[in-house]
Amino acid sequence: MTSKQEAIVSGEQIKNMLLGAYKSFENNYQYINDLNVFPVPDGDTGTNMMHTMAAVARDLSQLHNATVSEVGTMAARSAIMGARGNSGVILSQLLRGLGKGLAGKKRATSNEVGKAFQFGILYAYRAVSKPVEGTILTVARAIAKGAYHAVRQGDDFEDVLCEAIDSGKKELARTPELLPALKAAGVVDAGGQGLIVFLEGCLAGFRGEDAGELHLPPAKPSFANSIEMEVDLENPYCTEFIVKEADVKESTVRDTLQPLGNSLIVAIVGDIVKVHIHTKAPGLVLQQGLSWGTLHDIKIDNMAEQHEHRVMKVVPAEKRGLAVLAVAAGSGIATIMHQLGAGEIISGGQSMNPPVEAFIKVIENGSAEQYIILPNNKNIILAAEQVKKLLGAAQVDYVPTTNLAQGLAALLHFDAAKSMQENSVVMRREAKEAHSAAVSIAVRDSVVNGIQVKKGQYIGLLEDKIVYAGATLEEVTAATVKLAGSDWELISLYYGSDLTRADAEKLAAELEELGGDWEVSVFDGGQPLYPLLLSLE
């Protein structure tokens, strides 16, 4: 009779275990989402973990009679490429560790699988450079300890899983004591709960419990990696340049250049003016720029010719140079970032975090040799870091931008003539100096920073922190800007998909009457979930 220590686990059992984990997320992802205490509509921890496991389940479903090594290797690769959001990246690292622990084995003993699982949990813990107690990482550490003791005792793998789940649940119950925000909301950590859901699904699958039909989302992610722009034959020349040593107001630049074309973007940083415009007379535009200072980095492209080449599917030239790959939350923001110099755009943001694979495909298909990623959302930073690890620091770097204002500030200081390292240093510095505000709508009742928030209220945020809640968009916008202080020269207002330009211009006029000595510029951001995103300069 086989002893506990010698019990054998097959590749098919590991496969069923991971398919069970996906089914567990499919049944519980919304419950995990609802544990997110921050009342803004980006509580998608469960959704991100489910989509990450969906990538694994999709590939494993096609695998038959495989060894434990083959199952582990495929699961690790699929999870890493399909990882979405910070929670998904952490989960992918768990599976990466599991795959490494099973590497080279046709079958494995319970002890070996238990050690591989423990190895995976440690990989997950190490995925974040600065662990915070009371989060998914605290629960992961407890799970690893429980698995370690069970493995040392020579338990069956099923018993190892049970012990890991029990240890994780005990630590999960403690998370409200470690994080005041959780205690105030009366919930446990969403990511930690996600790990328990994962392990419970693994246990069910390992026991051979029928997972039922797996409802897998489409294999191809619906994230744009390019912008299709209509070509304006009246203004076919995309003209960009920088004016240095300038002493001119943004309103003067706009008033002067607006009659000369469209798609005008003006950004002023100190005595530097950056201009983008579509025009039929680039010479006149440059002449105006020369009257404000010295011209630099002049670039004029014939968009009609470029469009014709795209339609004819001309094979791209050899990869060369450095470019920016930016994540944009709306079509308007995507266009603006493209016009300010981003070479590639990926659609993503709150509640729509792009997978690691989307970044890699864009980079592989792009025309540049090197890329700097601007995630522009705190929940996409680990994905960007993962891309850098997969493709190598010689090809990819990222600036940890957490919002639109930081992304734009970094992008404005991108210089393709300088090295990736030089750009990264400057862009990181400028991103940290950027100031942002936003208005969203609360998706749940909550108490944040001592502010009572009711579901459905408008909420104002400064530097990604809730500072005000109220009944109307006008009230919350005004209050949030007042709380930001008056030391601003320019407020850029990006309105979302649910607002009209007339709505936005009315809000801008009200902001200009608040008494601050600032100009307010209005842009169509097109972003969902956030009626307003603001950059304060």
Image: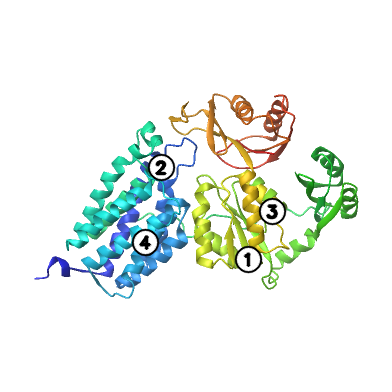
**Between disc 1 and disc 4, whose residue precedes?**
4
Where's residue 433, x and y in %?
A: 64, 44
Find out whether the residues at labels 4 and 3 contact each other: C-beta distance under 8 Å.
Answer: no
The quadrant of the picture occupied by the N terminus is bottom left
> Residue 516 or 90: which is nearer the viewer?
516
**Between disc 1 and disc 3, whose residue precedes?**
3
Which amino acid lies under the numbered mark 4 shown in the image of this protein? Answer: Leu
Crowding near the residue tagged with mark 3, few <14, some 14–19, many ≥20 C-alpha atoms within 10 Å: many
Which amino acid lies under the numbered mark 2 shown in the image of this protein? Answer: Asn
> Residue 210 or 249: which is nearer the viewer?
249
Which amino acid lies under the numbered mark 1 shown in the image of this protein? Answer: Gln
Crowding near the residue tagged with mark 4, few <14, some 14–19, many ≥20 C-alpha atoms within 10 Å: many
Q: Is residue 117 left or right of residue 216?
A: left
The quadrant of the picture occupied by the C terminus is top right
The residue sitting at 47% across, 30% down in the picture is 449
Q: Is residue 44 left or right of residue 436?
A: left
Q: Which residue is mark 2?
A: 33
Find out whether the residues at labels 2 and 3 contact each other: C-beta distance under 8 Å.
Answer: no
Find out whether the residues at labels 1 and 3 contact each other: C-beta distance under 8 Å.
Answer: no
Question: Which numbered tag is attached to residue 338?
Answer: 3
Crowding near the residue tagged with mark 1, few <14, some 14–19, many ≥20 C-alpha atoms within 10 Å: many
Q: Which residue is mark 1?
A: 370
Crowding near the residue tagged with mark 2, few <14, some 14–19, many ≥20 C-alpha atoms within 10 Å: many
Q: Which residue is mark 4?
A: 95
Question: Which numbered tag is attached to residue 316?
Answer: none
C-alpha gap between disc 4 and disc 3: 36 Å
Find out whether the residues at labels 1 and 2 contact each other: C-beta distance under 8 Å.
Answer: no
Q: Secondary structure at mark 4?
A: helix
The residue sitting at 41% across, 50% down in the picture is 131
